[in-house]
């Protein structure tokens, strides 16, 4: 049985009760807190910064997975590491120096990853696989929750899975493959079958009154994949 992780995106949580929301969703069976950072420059929306990450940190011992939709990246990445992030991912086209930015994140003690928009090629990984702990594939264009899953992402998931398996077979280590955008109970199995192991879901979880029911249903679907 493969290891699967469910990472609710706080983008769809009740921001007035964020600490409680984080605690509740982890108690309902989620594995990771997915923390979306938007700057109204790299993406046309604005969310939260390191202060909010620091504020939720005492509310959970689950890993906080910070997805930086910002440009420039380096200074904010360092601030999020200080604020208690465990994993920090960024978009390669938002950084002038991808290798350096990965180094900034890892030197700060966090796991690091690259995020790929639907039209961003995986070739950005070619020379940095040794520094990447996570690959995050966007299955919507970034900026907003509640969008529809783009089905062409499935081929990219297969492609990323092949790259990860080839790399880790030769060099060892572990690289997580996360997918983000439009993940629901009715498509999570298909995304897992294509090779993803970590699933971001915002509206599918936080827009329901009972988080455990949705997370249990997602786990039941994942169990079918094996
Ligand atoms: O990064 C994001 C948008 O940029 C969100 O994490 C993502 O869209 C999740 O929301 P939903 O599950 O509602 O699609």
Image (spheres, rainbow, N blue to C red):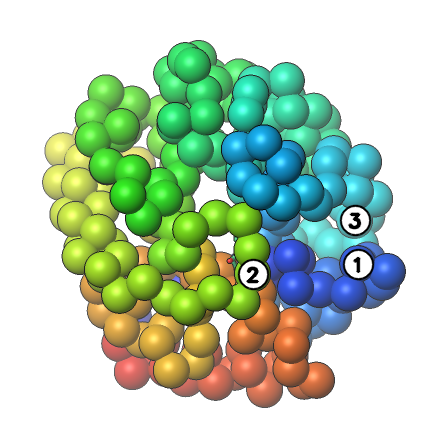
Q: Quadrant of residue 153?
A: bottom left
Q: Residue at x 45, y 26 (%)?
A: 94
Q: Residues within 10 Å of mark 2 (few under 14, many from 20)?
A: many
**Is there a contact, CB below 8 Å, between mark 2 and mark 3?**
no
- Quadrant of image for the C terminus: bottom left
Mark 2 vs mark 3: give the one in front: 2
Disc 3, SS: helix
- Find residue 25 and report its horizontal and vertical position in percent: 67, 69
Q: Quadrant of residue 125?
A: top left
Mark 2 vs mark 1: give the one in front: 2
Most foreground residue, 145 or 154: 145
Answer yes or no: disc 2 within 8 Å of ligand 1: yes
Cα–Cα span, label 2 and label 3: 20 Å
Q: How many marks?
A: 3
- Find residue 170 and report its horizontal and vertical position in percent: 14, 33
User: Relative to residue 160, is residue 213 drawn left or right?
Assistant: right
Q: Which residue is mark 1?
A: 15
Q: Which residue extends farthest right? A: 16
Residue 142 sits above or below residue 114 on the image: below
Q: Which residue is mark 3?
A: 56
Q: Which mark is residue 145?
A: 2
Cα–Cα span, label 3 and label 1: 11 Å
User: Relative to residue 91, is residue 191 drawn left or right?
Assistant: left
Mark 3 vs mark 1: give the one in front: 1
Q: Considering only order in the chain, which callout, 1 or 2, is on the residue closer to the N terminus? A: 1
- Find residue 63 and report its horizontal and vertical position in percent: 61, 48
Q: Considering only order in the chain, which callout, 3 or 2, is on the residue closer to the N terminus? A: 3
Disc 2, SS: loop
Answer yes or no: disc 1 within 8 Å of ligand 1: no
User: Relative to residue 30, is residue 223 drawn left or right?
Assistant: left
Regarding residue 3, the answer to whether it shows in the image is no
């Amino acid at each position: 049985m493969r290891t699967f992780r469910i990472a609710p995106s706080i983008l769809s949580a009740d921001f007035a009760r964020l600490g409680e929301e984080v605690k509740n969703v982890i108690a309902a069976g989620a594995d990771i807190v997915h923390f979306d950072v938007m700057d109204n420059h790299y993406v046309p929306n604005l969310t939260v910064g390191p202060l909010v990450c620091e504020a939720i940190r005492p509310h959970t011992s689950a890993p906080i997975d910070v997805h930086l939709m910002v440009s420039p990246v380096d200074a904010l990445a360092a601030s999020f590491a200080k604020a208690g992030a465990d994993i920090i991912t960024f978009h390669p086209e938002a950084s002038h120096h991808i290798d350096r930015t990965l180094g900034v994140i890892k030197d700060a003690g966090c796991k690091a990853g690259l995020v790929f928009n639907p039209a961003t090629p995986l070739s950005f990984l070619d020379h940095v696989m040794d520094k990447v702990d996570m690959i995050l594939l966007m299955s919507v264009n970034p900026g907003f929750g509640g969008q529809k899953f783009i089905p062409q992402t499935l081929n990219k998931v297969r492609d990323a899975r092949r790259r990860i398996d080839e790399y880790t077979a030769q060099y060892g280590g572990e690289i997580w493959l996360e997918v983000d955008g439009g993940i629901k109970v009715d498509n999570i199995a298909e995304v897992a079958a294509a090779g993803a192991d970590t699933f971001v879901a915002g509206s599918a979880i936080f827009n329901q009154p009972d988080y455990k029911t949705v997370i249990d249903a997602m786990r039941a679907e994942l169990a079918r994949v094996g």
